[in-house]
């Protein structure tokens, strides 16, 4: 149970940190006991460091990232972090289970396709960063990476009922971003929302081979942000067969449309 | 009982919005959250349940971010009527956690809750750029706890 914060004297019942990573705001919130401790600060630092490390591997903006050097043939995959092979495998798996609606093979400048795992790196990074926060006793946490988020708590904290720490997650209205269309309460899990209303046509539709822009948004919840985010993208761009694949191939995940 | 609670919270949100306008705190990002869009949700206005709140109860409402910090109001409801309203100044200095925590919450997928009834902790939306973030609801929520 979080402690009461009575103006000045009591310890924080909640703290927030915000940093800029991968071109987006990343905020970490902690609630619960001992969130003013050095251990809590170190865990948050390690979580943010995870974003930095993954960006050095996978950035498509930094010419010296491992991904860009791999693409130019300056290094082989064995000289890259083991994360690179994992990303390739995750990309193939995602393409299979979404029936082709999500892909990590995106159009390159010269008319071909090249490996671009950007669409899964963010959610994956949040899941990896969360491991640093999950070890803090009595602490519930939330990592929000540009609108896709994951919440969780130490294994000893209850997930429901007395003593559970619950996060109320507002879902942004795709038609008016200062409004909310709904809200979910959860103590553990991921919430990913895909749409093109915030930054224009940046989602790739493999069937048509084009970047698409359309109104509305798709929100997917589930155990990990890696897969919630993959499915949110796939369901936003995908066809009926993708919705069928989700219904049967994504146990533990749920979708809502706005 | 839960339904009654929601009435209270909705009423409170209306009060919060009025409070916001009345004190001329200016246009804020969170001022656009549709907190007052359900006037029918006033206490006693729903004939469907026929329930009445004989005992007085207090409800802590949704905090509304202003340029001066979070504004939050507590109301007392007795017999379906608001009998007292009090501003809580400190962000998160409330008993709201306990109330939410007493609900059964399915893990992972979450329980759908009423935007009007809940104090929002975080916001999910299409990927924000850093530029768009500064005017976002999430930014206001972060600022409240930095």
Image (cartoon, rainbow, N blue to C red):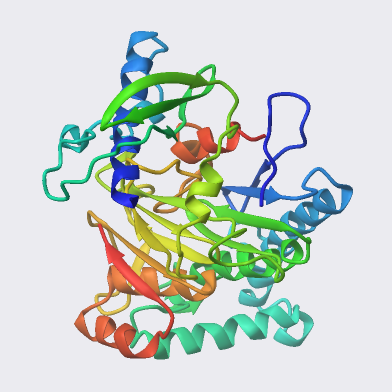
The front one of A119 and B3 is B3
The front one of B44 and A130 is B44
Q: Residue shown at 79%/58% (left/top)? A: A46
Q: Residue shown at 31%/17% (left/top)? A: B18
Q: Residue shown at 49%/89% (left/top)? A: A93
**In the depicted structure, whether residue A83 falls above or below residue A46:** below
Q: Position of residue A64 (x, y in %)?
A: 71, 62
Q: Going by the picture, which residue comes out furthest to the left?
A: B47
**In the depicted structure, whether residue B77 falls above or below residue B85:** below
Observer able to see residue A50? yes
Q: Quadrant of residue A163?
A: bottom right
The front one of A92 and A147 is A147
Q: Position of residue A187 (x, y in %)?
A: 54, 62
Residue A209 falls left or right of residue A6: left
Q: Position of residue A4 (x, y in %)?
A: 67, 37
Q: Going by the picture, which residue comes out furthest to the front?
A: B54
Q: Residue shown at 44%/73% (left/top)? A: A230
Q: Quadrant of residue A220?
A: bottom left
């Amino acid at each position: 149970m979080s402690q009461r914060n009575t103006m000045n004297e009591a310890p924080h019942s909640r703290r927030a940190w915000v940093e800029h990573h991968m071109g987006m705001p990343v905020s970490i919130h902690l609630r619960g006991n001992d969130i003013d401790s050095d251990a809590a600060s170190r865990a948050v630092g390690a979580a943010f460091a995870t974003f930095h490390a993954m960006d050095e591997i996978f950035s498509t903006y930094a010419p010296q990232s491992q991904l860009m050097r791999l693409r130019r043939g300056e290094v082989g995959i064995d000289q890259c972090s083991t994360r690179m092979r994992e990303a390739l495998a995750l990309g193939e798996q995602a393409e299979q289970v979404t029936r082709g609606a999500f892909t990590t093979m995106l159009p390159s400048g010269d008319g071909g396709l090249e490996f671009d795992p950007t669409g899964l790196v963010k959610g994956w990074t949040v899941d990896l960063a969360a491991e640093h926060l999950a070890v803090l006793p009595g602490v519930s946490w939330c990592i929000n990476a540009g609108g896709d988020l994951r919440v969780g708590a130490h294994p000893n904290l209850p997930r429901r009922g007395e003593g559970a720490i619950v996060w109320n997650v507002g879902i942004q209205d795709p038609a008016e971003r200062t409004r909310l269309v709904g809200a979910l309460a959860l103590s553990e899990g991921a919430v990913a929302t895909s749409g093109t209303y915030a930054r224009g046509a940046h989602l790739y539709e493999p069937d048509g081979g084009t970047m698409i822009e359309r109104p509305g948004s798709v929100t997917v919840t589930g155990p990990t942000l890696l897969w919630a985010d993959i499915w949110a993208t796939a369901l936003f761009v995908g066809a009926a067969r993708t919705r069928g694949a989700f219904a049967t191939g994504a146990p533990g995940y749920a979708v809502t449309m706005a | 009982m839960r339904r009654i609670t929601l009435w209270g919270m909705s009423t409170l949100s209306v009060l919060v919005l009025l409070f916001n306008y009345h004190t001329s705190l200016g246009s804020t990002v969170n001022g656009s959250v549709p907190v007052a869009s359900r006037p029918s949700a006033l206490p006693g206005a729903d004939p469907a349940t026929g329930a009445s709140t004989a005992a007085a109860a207090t409800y802590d409402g949704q905090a509304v971010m202003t340029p001066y910090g979070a504004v939050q109001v507590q109301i007392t409801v007795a017999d379906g009527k608001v009998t007292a309203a009090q501003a809580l100044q400190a962000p998160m200095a409330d008993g709201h956690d306990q109330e939410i925590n007493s609900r059964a919450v399915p893990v992972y997928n979450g329980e759908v809750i009423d935007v009007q009834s809940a104090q929002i902790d975080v916001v999910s939306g299409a990927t924000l750029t850093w530029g768009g973030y500064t005017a976002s609801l999430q930014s206001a929520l972060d600022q409240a706890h930095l």
